[in-house]
Image: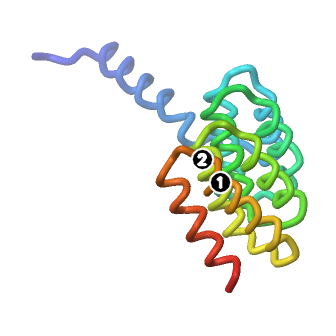
Amino acid sequence: MKFTRPCIALCTAIFLFSGLPLFAQKTTDQYIADLQSEESAVQIESCRKLGEKKEEKAVGELVKLAQSSKDRGVVFQAVTALGQIGKAGVSTDALLDIGRKSAMSEVQYAALLGLVNLRDEKKAGDISSLCQWIQENSTDDVLKDLAVKVAQIIKK
């Protein structure tokens, strides 16, 4: 099969332009703005990036998103990002609140893991209380087991 110049030029253009998104990096402010997107996939990706970057200035917006979104994937990723960022205080209060109010086991799971990562000694009693509440009220055995383990870690 013989390649012609137009075919080669077209293949080269497709290769070059398809690679552009790989090189384009958004700023922290762009990721924070994307948390308000109508598309859950954009919100999830922004949460993921902000968590990976440990962007403390995103905490307030992540809390709002975690508390207001109806999309379980978005809520899960926002809660996960709060735990990854590791800024105790506002994040701790939000994770405690979400851990108790959420009906989604995976969100409660992420909240517990985030609380362990935050290591907020001032809120150890509240975290233990949440663990006890989950043990008594959850129907998810894995989540109950995690609550037992988190309570043990917090006591140390």
- Secondary structure, mark 2, is loop
> Is residue 70 or residue 134 the one in the foreground?
134
Which amino acid type is shown beneath numbered disc 2?
Ser
Q: Quadrant of the C terminus?
A: bottom right
Q: Is residue 137 above or below residue 30?
A: below
State the image coordinates of residue 155 (x, y, percent, origin top left).
Answer: 70, 81
- Which type of secondary structure does the marked residue at label 1 adopt? helix
Is there a contact, CB below 8 Å, between mark 2 and mark 1?
yes
Residue named by callout 2: 138
Q: How many numbered tags mark residues here?
A: 2
Three-letter code, disc 1: Ile
Which residue is label 1 attached to?
134
Q: CA distance from mark 2 to mark 1?
A: 5 Å
Q: Position of residue 97 (x, y in %)?
A: 82, 49
Residue at point 44%, 23% (across, down): 13
18 up-or-down from 52: above or below: above
